[in-house]
Image (cartoon, rainbow, N blue to C red):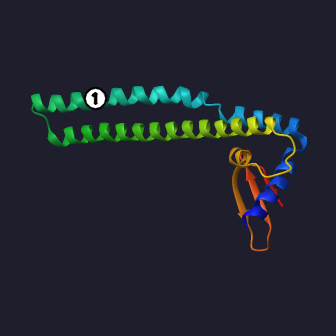
Amino acid sequence: DEEEIKARFVTAYNTLAADKTLLLDDCRIIQTTLSDCMALDAEIPALQEEIVVVAELIRKCVEENSHDAQNQSEYGARYNGYVERYEAALTKLEELQREHALRQAKADAIGAFMFAISEQDALTAFDAKLWTATIRSVTVHSDGRMVFRFQTGADIEV
């Protein structure tokens, strides 16, 4: 029941926070690693530029076709090639932007976790705010075991 989960959270939290200094040092390393988006930040503008260039090539291709008589199969092949290139760049850009947002969200969650841990000593009673800031999920097994997954990715079984 809920009261048992709350009581076991207190135990799991106290187990995790037994060495707060080591835990916070590990969290800083994790946060730094998660928030390192240098490669993404370099690739995103290049893809944005690629999209602009290919969009202009598509526009020019259509304009040329409307003004000058062209072999339509050659025009279609060239146009379709540009469109495929545009769509591939757009898909890659969206993937990178999602990855960037995901990394930032994880780093923010670790930051909130670190703040909560640094402000809290050993728990003697359930704290709903600490639960929200530190717990990612809880798995309750049929044999009564519970596994608390913290925002850091650490699993504590109680």
On the image, the x and y values in percent for residue 17 come to 85, 44
On the image, the x and y values in percent for residue 150 come to 74, 49
Q: How many marks?
A: 1
| Quadrant housing residue 119 | top right
- Left or right: where 152 falls relative to 47: right
| Along the viewing direction, whichever of 125 and 78 lies nearer the viewer | 125
Q: Is residue 95 above or below residue 4?
A: above
Q: Residue at x 77, y 58 (%)?
A: 6
Give the quarter of the figure containing the C terminus. Answer: bottom right
| Along the viewing direction, whichever of 5 and 48 lies nearer the viewer | 5
Q: Residue at x 61, y 27 (%)?
A: 38
| Quadrant housing residue 50 | top left
| Along the viewing direction, whichever of 38 and 135 lies nearer the viewer | 135
Secondary structure of residue under mark 1 = helix
On the image, the x and y values in percent for residue 8 come to 81, 59
Q: Which residue is mark 1?
A: 57
> What amino acid is found at the position of numbered circle 1 in the picture?
Leu
Q: Is residue 134 above or below residue 7?
A: above
- Left or right: where 32 falls relative to 79: right
